[in-house]
Image (tube, rainbow, N blue to C red):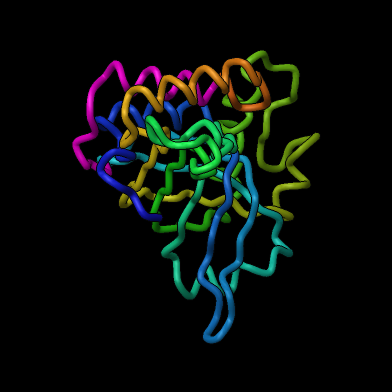
Amino acid sequence: MLIHPWDAPHDEHEWRSWLAEHDFGQLAVNGGPGEPPWVQPTHFRYEPEPGPYGRVITHLARPNPLWRDLEHNPAVLLSVVDDHVFVPGHGTAPAGAPPEHGTPTSYYAAVQLRCTAHVVDDPEEKAELLQRQVAHFQPEGGTAPVRAGEAPFGRMLPGIRVLCLEVTDVRAKFKYAGNKPQEVQDRVAARLAERGGPGDAAALSHQARRRATGPATGLSR
């Protein structure tokens, strides 16, 4: 993922706070020699600790074909993308240029977590980690606890494997026209507000927030 200085997070808090509100992504696992990577859509729970970047908890079905390659090479990438919109070219033209000379583009937020995967098969540990996932997605409760050897979910534990992903590096990008003159940013913002389509409000919020907090520092952490 190319990250220009004007698209980089302004600080570590920016990507952490965004990721705290996102819990669905695509897990990329290296394929075998000559094969493309496996890409698995998955819900996950991100935890800011332990370590400098935290960890990710998720689980997959035991018949999933990626396990063999994952165990051969535990280096994986979790990609999370959201708050994306298409920006028509007629809103991005430089001052004084005809509208049709503007360049169509896209805005989006993306965080990529490089991780070392640890496969968990111990029933007691799996149950505890699954319970942490459930608590994240369903804090109101209403589902029986996951306990090894106990109904209703104990018998299902052998059918899944849990992944603890130790995050070793983070790359983040907030592509919201940070390199454009204020006049162009204002024009695009006005047109997105008028359009009011899916993702437009989130994109406007990012654009306004980043303008208020200053230029990017180039940090990827």
Residue 9, given in percent of the width and then of the height, sits at 30, 35
**Residue lying farthest bottom?**
34
- Residue 109 shown left or right of residue 191 in the figure: left
Name the one closer to the observer, 47 or 206. 206
Residue at x 51%, y 58% (from the top left corner): 119
Name the one closer to the observer, 82 or 135. 82
As displayed, is residue 209 above or below residue 58?
above
Q: Quadrant of residue 136?
A: top right
Main SS class of the magenta portion in the image: helix
Q: Is residue 128 visible?
A: no
Residue at x 46%, y 43% (from the top left corner): 56
Instruction: Quadrant for the N terminus, please.
Output: bottom left
Residue 81, given in percent of the width and then of the height, sits at 53, 41
Residue at x 31%, y 21% (from the top left corner): 211
Residue at x 71%, y 55% (from the top left corner): 61
Residue 144, given in percent of the width and then of the height, sits at 74, 25
Residue 178, given in percent of the width and then of the height, sits at 33, 33
Number of labels in the image equals 0
Q: Does 216 lie within the magenta span?
A: yes
Q: Does 144 lie within the magenta span?
A: no
Instruction: Quadrant for the C terminus, please.
Output: top left
Q: Quadrant of residue 193?
A: top right
As displayed, is residue 134 above or below residue 57?
above
As displayed, is residue 197 above or below residue 3?
above
Q: Is residue 24 visible?
A: yes
As displayed, is residue 20 above or below residue 43?
above
- Residue stretch in magenta: 202-221
